[in-house]
Image (cartoon, helix red, strand yellow):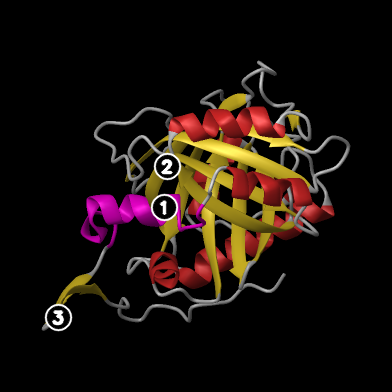
Amino acid sequence: MENDRLQTQRFELKFQVPEATAVAVRHFVRPYLAPDESASDPTFPAYPVHSLYLDSGDLHTYRATINGDRDRYKLRVRYYDEKPDSPVFLEIKRRVDRCIYKQRAAVVRSHVPALLSGAWPSTHDLVRPGPKGLAALQKFSELLRRLGARPRARVSYDREAWTSEGHNAVRVTMDRTVLCEPELGPRLDTTFRQPARPFGNNVILEIKFTNRFPDWLAVMVRTFNLVQGGAAKYVDGVNALGPGRFAEELSRSPFGTHLTRAKNSPPLPVPAF
């Protein structure tokens, strides 16, 4: 999974669909896309994805999504298993209007707790030292410190992925069994205690493309009457369980419970890419 095809800049469309539609989409995309090379079964190219989301005590990145901020970002730790020698990816995912930008660094798993506690990174933290990875890791650590972010939630799902051969211009993924629960420490587990299923039995279908939207994808959207909608796994997971289980500070207002900035909290940054 270390060499997955990361689309560092892309457009992204999301749909919630029933399982029957997801199966039909699989058959539709096969002539155009290849199974993701990370999956062991090419007929059903699926693999587990686990993410630890980081946020401030007052859930700043959560609120930015709820408010529909046009320039927002998330910090997360992504991993695919519990093997001690498997890499862990520290990621920044930023949205500017309709465009998605991603930066990630593959780091040594045993170094993750120190990095999430605010330790400044070095090349020794990287699985494969290099200037690009170090720059991404330093940007992640800078945002972590300035936001005062800590682990808040763990999200997992099974991802079926199809991608264009020879390049990463188009990627179609289908995420099943999305689970979310609070996680306030740097634990990189793959099991859950009492998770929420924010999307029920629906499949999260995502179309990701780097340039022009291909005609055949437009035909697919029309054929299955796909209706674009929100499907933010972290945000919807928090909503399902209630922000109070993830935040450090809640206050009452005449209009109900709302989140407030922590005292003496640092300025809230917008990352430069």
Label of residue 183 in the image = none
Quarter of the image that includes the N terminus:
top right
Q: Is residue 215 left or right of residue 160?
A: right
Circle 1 residue: 234
Q: CA distance from mark 3 to mark 1?
A: 24 Å
Which quadrant of the figure contains the C terminus?
bottom right
- The answer to whether mark 2 and mark 1 are in CB contact below 8 A is yes
Magenta-highlighted residues: 227-247
Q: At label 3, which amino acid type do we have? A: Phe
Q: Is residue 246 magenta?
A: yes
Residue situated furthest right in the rendering: 166
Local SS, label 2: strand
- Crowdedness near tag 3: few (<14), some (14–19) or many (≥20) residues, C-alpha within 10 Å: few
Neighbours of disc 2 within 10 Å: few (<14), some (14-19), many (20+)? many
| Residue 89 horizontal side relative to residue 178, left or right | right
Does residue 211 sit above or below 174 in this rendering? below
| Residue 83 locus on image (x, y percent) | 56, 23
In percent of the image, x 44 and y 62: which residue is there? 149
Q: Secondary structure at mark 1?
A: helix
Closer to viewer: mark 2 or mark 3: 3
Q: Which image quadrant is residue 26 in?
A: top right
Residue named by callout 3: 255
Task: Report the amino acid beneath label 2.
Answer: Val
Name the spot of residue 178 as percent of width and height, x first: 41, 38
Figure quadrant of residue 254 = bottom left
Q: Is residue 111 magenta?
A: no
Q: Which residue is mark 2?
A: 155
What amino acid type should be assigned to the residue bearing mark 1? Tyr
